[in-house]
Amino acid sequence: MFQLDEQTQMVAGVFRQWCQSTLQPRVPALEAGTEQPFDLMKQMAKTFGFDAMLGGAVKKRLAKLKAGETAPGESLAASSGTPMMMHVVVKELSRVSPGFAMGFGVSMGLAGGSIVAKGTAEQIERWGLPLATMQKIGAWCLTEPGAGSDAFGSMRTTATADGDGYRLTGSKTFITNGPGADIFLVYARTPDGIGSFIVERAMSGVTVGPPFKKMGMRDSPTSEVFFDDVKLGAEHRLPGGRSATKDSLGTERSGVPAMAWGIIERCYDMSLQHVRDRKQFGRAIGDFQAVQLKITDLFLKLRTVENVVFRLAWMQQAGVKDQPFVNASKAMSAQLAVDAALTAIQIHGGMGYMEELGLEKLARDAKLLELGAGTTDINLLAAARELIGPLEA
């Protein structure tokens, strides 16, 4: 599978039109923080029928649970039968606004997808379905001020037993969608290990800090979230512990290559057109060998990441687990996106450095792909350790 089918190509074309006509004009205000992206996310979901497409998949999962099925569910993309289509949606959004794509993916795929895959029928109906259909905005809360790469070992947020429920205390940081989320999926230390809890914004004891000022992904509002003795019922704890968290991390990392694909594709498209149009010393700069080498480099980066996304979609469709590939390809795709954006800026010269073209935004945004969902080093080490396996002392 190395070519999009006709239906997916059509979806890509329609999404590109929407991104250019509706999303692109909003990017300056989103970057400045004078507008928030959440209403636009909901509008997009309604425009393209996510409520029918993904809502239908969630309802099938609900029916199976109510019929007695106990096995964990699939990701939202896989359960809807359209993993490649969802990757293409993320790619098209990332051509214009990687931050918007990230917020959308975190709400629907991470927060909503985790509840749909791991939750009870009651949890899915109450919280998973509204997130999957973008009726509500979700946030995924793992990172803490002192717990980044060592997310589990250094975790200080706790959920202590309180009757048949829990008391949640602690804080999370760098939380995508934090300023506008209705539902938070929070990971906390419990007496029996790591647990995940569904927390509603309106609950007593939940407060959200102001949006961070960031180098990139400025159109994706990010903040701290504080939990001060928040009372939760037993129904707020999601089944599964640390292993469920790792599954969610795998889902997050699987989405990064599609974002990188969008960034690299736009860098390549703009650069190819530029070297044909821009003239210096009496000829198009595409006639210079140094420029030709840069274009070929961008082309290879584009095809490499595109092929990674095709394989990830095939894995999701076929139910194939290959965590070393997910981790390593996430790291590689992020690095290639940063390199591609810087190469595109170099090709465009001084204009590439200006906000007007949007390339400097792509460079700023791409850098987060090397940091979020596990840093590049952590992802590569995780892949290596699983490939090598346990070693004798």
Image: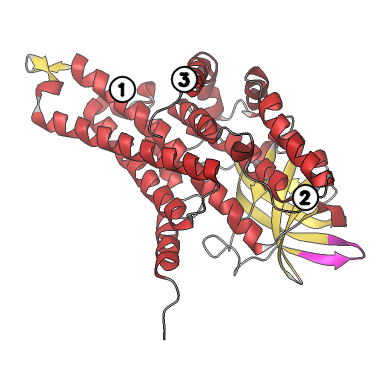
Type of secondary structure dominating the magenta stretch: strand
Q: Quadrant of the N terminus?
A: top left
Disc nearer the start of the sequence (2/3): 3
Q: Is residue 116 left or right of residue 325?
A: right
Q: Is residue 286 above or below residue 300?
A: above
**Cα–Cα span, label 1 and label 2:** 50 Å
Closest to the camera, between mark 1 and mark 2, is: 2
The amino acid pointed to by label 1 is Met
Q: Is residue 317 left or right of residue 70?
A: left
What crowding class fits label 2: few (fewer than 14 Cα within 10 Å), some (14-19), or many (20 or more)?
Answer: few
Query: Tag 3, which secondary structure?
Result: helix
Magenta span includes 276: no
Residue under label 3, please give it.
6
Q: Residue at x 55, y 23 (%)?
A: 29
Question: In terms of depth relative to the viewer, which is nearer, 36 or 393?
Answer: 393
The amino acid pointed to by label 2 is Glu
Closest to the camera, between mark 1 and mark 3, is: 3
Magenta span includes 164: yes
Question: In terms of depth relative to the viewer, which is nearer, 310 or 14?
Answer: 310
Residue under label 2, please give it.
69
**Cα–Cα span, label 1 and label 3:** 25 Å
Q: Residue at x 54, y 37 (%)?
A: 102
In the rendered image, which quarter is residue 177 located in? top right
Mark number for residue 270?
A: 1
**Cα–Cα span, label 2 and label 3:** 35 Å
Q: Is residue 228 above or below residue 162?
A: above
Query: Tag 2, which secondary structure?
Result: loop
